[in-house]
Image: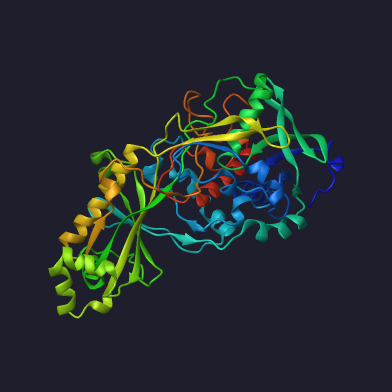
Amino acid sequence: MIINNLEEIKNKNFFAIIVGSGPAGISMALGLEKKKIECLIIEAGGLNSSTKNIPYLKGVFIGDSDYNTLENSRGRQFGGTGNYWGGNCNPIQEDEFSDWPIAKTDLDKYINGAKKILNIKKKFFLEKFSDNLNLYNLDWSDVKFGDKYFDHIKKSKYINLSLNTVYLSGNGGNGQVTSINCFKDKNYKLRGKNYILSCGGIENSRLLLWTKNNNPQLFKYNLPIGNYYMDHPFHMVADGILNYKNLQLYNQKNNIKKVPFITCESSYHLSSNQNFIKEKKIINSGIYISFLKANIYNSIFKQVRCMAPNFIKEIYENKSTKSSYQIEIQILQEQEPLFDRKITLNKNSDPLGIPLPEAHWWKTKLERTSARTITEEIAKIFLKNNIARIGLKEYLFNDENYVTSAGYHQLGGTRMGSSIKDSVVDKNLKVHGINNLFINGSSVFRTGSYTHPTYTIVKLALRLSDYLTKV
């Protein structure tokens, strides 16, 4: 049901008020609807994106200059960034949960529900590629959350939606939120049993920090709100020429079953196993090996011919030019959770007086050395098995600045954990010390993993809806 006039519901007490209508908020509402439990979603934006929202999406950035501007990496409309996300999905693997207060099995029961919401069909796999690397797959979702779920919510008996409704702050004390302040043409107080911030990786931290500033007596503990912020730097680390016949022989020899069919648009996806990560003291990456049809007159072909003439000679002699590919190797890189990589409040405010976010983000030496170590491992496998010859980018070996395209995956800031010293929410996404305030979305990720986050976000949202209906 669409709520156009908040006067109609200002005295109502909802089971849950969800702040934000992105993938986290919508999935949470769908989970409650399935149990026939009524909730309210408030969305600061309208049905569509508008330039008038840019002043609300701006922020200040401190750190490496190649990071995305905040207004271009966030959304303020129904569906949030779920309206223009890339659609890639894959799960965080079991060993990646080692520092989380939950395990992969805690989310596995929500696989079918998440796949239904995201309209994904494939079965995810993780298979040994070598002693140190794994082969994995992605699935692609065609779901644009605003387009798919607006009519559904409009007709729903259990999901209420109020657009252009801005969360201002929370009221209450002694560990209990009693109401929230909102603005829709004028100020309102809305009441519910549970309150869930589901506004994205940066906005969750911003609104929670602002709530604490306005109502410090609500918080029992001095939590690290905004700290341990992460993203997924994405950059090219190598390119070269690959002999596909030799790759096929390698796959057969090593009994690799889940081999993707190669076209000019396909990729191999590799990641490091935990033994390799611990041995080399590195962080992980999702490795994307893209296959492009090779042209023997391309400069990359000429470069490889100069560096590895015997390899190119073999391609010619075996008449393998048609099965040779130019490859590009890119990585979607995990970041270590650092306390000082954080979201804070800036001295400047948006038009409603809420301070703009200030993002402190930079790349570290560990990220560069990890990228080099993993790429060198791939190069060794390719050389030993005569699969390919690749050249690593020079920046992996020096201290020069290098440009990344951040993955637009804003992670951390209200991270999950058991201790108030290094986390903001518990394993059930409840803010430490507050009985009925929850955080939902990528901001609760304790570590970034190398995976795309939306699939996990949806499963966490369904798990939270389950938890709230059982306590």
- State the image quarter where residue 156 is shown: bottom right
> Across the whole image, how many numbered discs are drawn on residues?
0
Residue 341 appearing in the image: yes
Task: Specify how the rendered protein is coloured.
Answer: rainbow
Picture coordinates of residue 17 (x, y %)? 71, 39
Describe residue 324's horizontal placement relative to residue 37 as left or right.
left
Residue 49 in the image, given as x and y percentages of width and height:
68, 54
Q: Is residue 437 visible?
A: no
Task: Classify the position of the C terminus by image quarter.
Answer: top right
Give above or below for 194 relative to 31: above
Furthest residue toward bottom? 319
- Image position of 272 (left or right of 431): left
**Is 10 situated left or right of 82 in this image?**
right
Query: Residue 434: where, in percent of width, then height?
Result: 62, 26
Q: Residue at x 46, y 51 (%)?
A: 452
Relative to 83, residue 297 above or below: below
Task: Identify the image quadrant of residue 389.
Answer: bottom left
Q: Residue furthest left?
A: 310
Q: Residue at x 73, y 40 (%)?
A: 166
Please state if 63 lies on the left or on the right of 153 as rendered: left
Residue at the right extreme, as displayed = 7
- Name the one closer to the observer, 458 or 227: 227
Instruction: Give me the residue at 66% from left, 60% from top.
Output: 148
Give the vertical position of 128 relative to 276 (above or below): below
Q: Image point 79% across, 51% down: which residue?
A: 2
Residue 347 pos. (x, y %): 62, 28
